[in-house]
Image (cartoon, coloured by chain):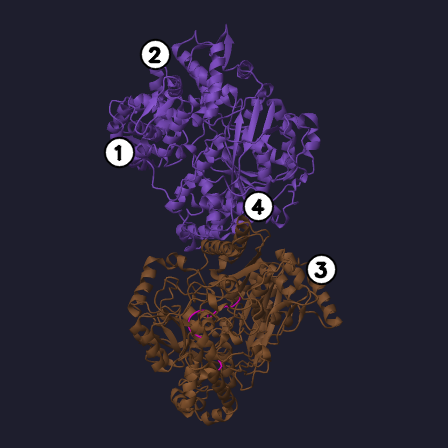
Amino acid sequence: MFRHVSPELPGLAAAVAGCAPAHGHRPRLRRPFPEAEKTARGRATAPGGSGRGRLPGPPPGAAGSTAAAGRGGAGGAACRDGPYEGGPGRRLPLARPLTRRRSAAQHGSAMAAAAEEAAGGGGDSPSSALRRLRIISGHLRGSPRAPEREALSPSPCKAQGGSDGPASGSIPKKRQELLKWNGWGYNDSKFIFNKKGQAEFTGKRYRLGGMVLPTFKEWIEKTFGASLEHKTTSRASLNVNDVPPSIVNEEFLQDLKATKISYSQDAEDRVFRAHGHCLHEIFVLREGMFKRIPDLVVWPVCHEDVVKIVELACKHNLCIIPFGGGTSVSSALECPEEEKRTIVSLDTSQMNRILWIDEKNLTACVEAGIVGQDLEKQLAESGFCTGHEPDSMEFSSLGGWVATRASGMKKNIYGNIEDLVIHIKMVTPRGIVEKNCQVPRMSTGPDIHHFIMGSEGTLGVVTEVTIKIRPVPEYQKYGSVVFPNFERGVACLREVAKQRCAPASIRLVDNAQFQFGHALKPQVASIFTSFLDGLKKFYITKFKGFDPNVLCVATLLFEGDREKVLQHEKQVYDIATKFGGLAAGEDNGQRGYMLTFVIAYLRDLGLDYYVIGESFETSVPWDRVLDLCRNVKERIVRECKEKGVQFAPLSTCRVTQTYDAGACVYFYFAFNYRGISDPIHVYEQIERAAREEILANGGSLSHHHGVGKLRKRWMKESISDVGLGMLRSVKEYVDPNNIFGNKNLL
Amino acid sequence: MAPPIARSARPPPRLPQRAGRPSRGGAGPWALREAAAGGRPPRRGRAGERGAGRRGAARRTMAAAAAAPGRARRGAPMYSKELTSKKRDEFEDILEERRLSSDLRYAMKCYTPVIYKGLSPCKPNAIKSAVLQSEQVQYVIKQLAKEMGESPDIIQEEAMEILDEMGHSMQLGAVRFFAFTLSKIFKQLFQRVCVNEEGMQRLQHAIQEHPVVLLPSHRSYVDFLMLSYLLYTYDLALPVIAAGIDFLGMKIVGELLRRAGAFFMRRSFGGNRLYWAVFAEYVKTMLRSGYAPIEFFLEGTRSRTAKTLTPKFGLLSIVMEPFFKREVFDTYLVPISISYERILEESLYAYELLGVPKPKESTSGLLKARRILSDNFGTIHIYVGQPVSLRTLASGRISRCPYNLVPRHLPQKPSEDIQEFVTDVAYKMELLQIENMVLSPWVLVAAVLLQNLPAMDFELLIEKTQWLKGLTQTFGGFVEWPDNLCAKKAVISGLTLHSNIARLVNGHVVLNDKGVEDGAVGEIVFKRALAILMCATYRNQLLNVFVRPSLVAVALQMTSSFRKEEVYSCFSFLRDVFSDEFIFFPGISLKDFEEGCFLLAKCDAIQTSQQEIYPTDKGSGIVSFLSAMFRPFVEGYQLIFRYLSKETKEAFTEKQFIPGVRNFVFQLLEKGNTQCYEALSSDMQKNALAALVQLGAAKKKKMSSGFTYNVNQEAVNKILDMFDARIPVQKPVAARL
């Protein structure tokens, strides 16, 4: 319970953090009531259940649009610490199942019982007693943790080269303790306007943290016609009375208890797994309530637990919706309103160990609930990485990546998820599906992995994935190039792709986004830097004649051994020069990538000032990139006007990935909705029009966000009737009773 | 909006919008996008709304027949005429200012036209080389090189030659030259040149927003000169104009036109893939870059009869393709109606229709024609219609798949969907042109006069003309008849202007067919035909406004039954037969019928019940007037069909057919067996033949020497029987399905 997340955990660069046994010395994070009491109250629901603990600082935040992948599906991470951990399923990092069982046994039955109660089991014990127990157990587990870990150190994982650090998830089981309940990201990280009216980013997790952004306010006013005087405020906390009651069949509960798998019927837990990060979902959190949410949340800790849960679901005819990192932007996590059965949200966050690392073949077998940042951190301890870095990697999970066909920023070196995956184990109502070997390629009919990847939780739960790993690169270097206009920039990216010399990442932002990035520039500390900036600006705009309202910027990231990186860098810059590009420095590049993670927080700020926005993506052949970008942006502008939006919207794009045959394009669009009575409806109409436009321009329905329920209507057009039938027949065979009934995709 | 428009009858000297910059004030960030967005939303005519319930039963019984003639079409029909009295813009005379100030200064004025927002200016030659280097043209060059075993360089050179022959080389100097000379000439020829300024403003916005295609009606060579002159006057980007290659035959003038922005297309290049590729790419390159508005004539050639010709689709589908492929966000199609009170080429046309060949375009011919400068040709009305957004038209109609699955530079045969869409758009644009054609009082006089030959009492003519004015307005015609002008003055001024056609003799108005009394019979017939065809040219301007109610009237008379079903069958038959003669939006026979009935009911000519249609007592005059108006066509077609059913050999070409049928009709006229002089018109003859092909009674085959026709005598006889109401119409119509 005394959840602690080391405050200095700075996003990516963070050293291993997580659930060190420190106590919550930050009052903001302390929860007034122990878990069990909450659950008990929550179940009593009824009148008077409202004096609930307040959520840890949930100021209206900014939700992201950036999150790139790992949406939906299975995945997630958690610290194994705190009251939830008591149950028999309890285990320690990197322990193999056997070891884990042993450790659980070590804990003694009293505690196990207490924890089981706590985990939402019997809510009938007096709450005060529970609280005491809980505090005690917290203390107990706080300190003995280290020795415990040592005791486990000779685990086979370690022998195989697996990491042995304090490997625990960065994301707790009680997500709301660390993450915003009604917005994107960490509670402590958000954009605010300080007393002086200047924008500022709080927290210390990101490089931007604590910095003042002097020009941001002006940008937001100019771009959206927004004014700081017109503010909306989100509800401060969840109103438990609004939450639909949990309806669960008693028999099933008995059976579930018998499995000793941790579960909860608590209202908060259920609401937080009822949504992803689409605009309308965040809007509902701020101002309304979902019509249908899961009735129960379960936390399996291993593959076997998942098997048991799926068996029970089949037996009692329940609906399971797998939940990983919760970063979906396709309405994939929304519960179908018409679902009459009990909906079980299967939170994979406790399945987050690296089971083994195979250095000879450079593969690692990982449980599917691990989130991106933990995976990289833990692999890094052994000197490895996967190199899969979707923009949402702080929160999205491995299983989610698989379930949505995710794509990472550095795919040029490491590949997308389909290139990275060697083996998948998935639990379905029909049984377990997996291959008999872990080989680079096989010709055994259509690849069953491709039924699983992109299945979006409609077929089963991915439990374990064997993934390729690489040694951590020796050297990393950022870079950036300014182009006189977007056309030249795209031509350059095309040439880079043609010569197959794309750096780990290469992205091209259009002018609007360049200006936006500019607005997020922190206050410059030294006069010298500001002088240099001025000089640079002068050189580019006056000497080179670039129009600051037309030019655009590419950001680059090189990785590898030092010499090759430098060589590679030169090659890319040479190509850029041919297209009129000017090198614009490492710092700009690095800032660009840092913004990727921070930008997602902006939406929450916008929501406070009547600005709503979203991002969407597509993939498109090279020859249509320019036309598609121009037409989609124009369509958005036009639709906004037709729908009565008072001020021209922000409608901007960037090319984020290059391939041999095309590119991935990412759009942001946001507008000021003052004067519109039903902004979400208007927004959805515009988003739909934009997607129509993409399709008409030869773009795909999605490059990596997936289909979910948001884009289902275009599936038939996208893959033809027969194609849809093929998918349906797989679904019908694997899951005839629609146990995995999230209604995504088909 | 730019400078407020003076609405008074006599405005102060108008300021052509200086430098043409759009006003951006007011609407904040949206200002620029304010422009004419999209066409008029397709609206169901009132005919459809009114009495829908009453007609329910009849509609059901008709359902089969209704579905019959039309192709099955996707989506809602995109054309629907507005039958409520339409508000039209007011006109301004642009010559007025020219008469008051220096033409030279005007020609040398500071010309900084409004251009497309995304345009990066380039020279005409840059366009040519872009076209030559384009993937599209290069692809075809490589293909041809492979097929013919020649070096690509040779074919490339050929392409270069084509481009040189085709390409315009617009120069401001030439433009200024035209601005000067045309000012002089127009002032000489015309009393007034009237333009709806609001239309010009809409056009101004449209030009900045998206690529623009100007689609004027085509009655005279003056059309495109006038339009460029107009755009120059209003400081708008000058259009590039698709002109027939024949102009190049004119020394100096051809080159001058080229410099004023004309580009030249061969009349037929069906088989020549290289030519097609180069031409299409040339047009598309100019469109995509927004280089200049592109202007061409949907009708393909000047209408010799002043009746709108059925549209040609080739060039239209070329200009629509960049949108289909999403190379541009949208394209504006602007229908422009140019109406002449007196057409410059009127007598030439009449001769041509009677088989006296059209003189070849030549500079000396032009010089010889200068005597017309001393003549008066009245007023020109130019109505620039609402720009129609192609995107709006296409929404929901075009499946995007075909264009996504093939690289965009490959030549691709348009899908059926696309072809149908292009056809619909072409008809829609022509119908929009027709809606805004200005009808002068003389047009009404001509229509009345033709029904009362050889002579008509002057007073009666005035009375009838006035009556027809009311009827025309009821039918949605755009009659330009100043409120304060009395009918007598209007008729007299018409007669004065057209003294070559008709004149007043002893209180009677007669056709001006001098020399009819003396001379050989043949000569008399020819002269008479000439006068009638010239007069008909003016009546014809009414026909497309009148055609729907009139064909209902004709059908009523032909069926001699009041059953709605039968009348509709007959109407539908006539509509099919005359589908090349008049402009009908494809596939909406029932709607046309309903519109016709609605208009007739509106002027109290008929009453309708669920099952039946009755002419009212009061309305019999209208019904017989309307059917008399179209009688020349009904009779003419019968004559031509009769010729085809009896006198033709197995296979024939058009060149054999026209003189043959002309002689046939001529003889009948000489013998006095018919009075249908209009059947001598080669235009009608061609249309009748085309109708037979469409009805399946004739076959058209492509031979090396051109097209040949085979007529199925039996089928033609059947059609003739239907005309004579000897057999009911339904059966063959149904059989054709």
Which chain hosts label 2? B
Chain (brown): A
Q: Are the residues under marks 4 and 1 on the same chain? A: yes
Q: Secondary structure at mark 4?
A: helix
The residue wearing badge 3 is A542
- The magenta stretch spans residue A77: yes
Q: What's the mark number on residue B672?
A: 2
Name the amino acid, label 2. Gly
The residue wearing badge 4 is B209
**Start and end of the magenta stretch?**
A66-79
Q: Are the residues under marks 3 and 2 on the same chain? A: no
Q: Secondary structure at mark 3?
A: helix
* Among the 4 quarters of the image, the one containing residue B377: top right
Disc 3 versus disc 2: nearer the observer:
3
Which chain hosts label 3? A
* Among the 4 quarters of the image, the one containing residue A598: bottom right
Q: Are marks 4 and 2 in contact (CB under 8 Å)?
A: no
Q: Secondary structure at mark 1?
A: helix
The residue wearing badge 1 is B734
| CA gap, disc 3 and disc 2 | 87 Å
Q: What's the mark number on residue B46?
A: none
Give neighbour class at mark 2: few <14, some 14-19, many 20+ (Cα, 10 Å).
Answer: few
Q: Secondary structure at mark 2?
A: loop
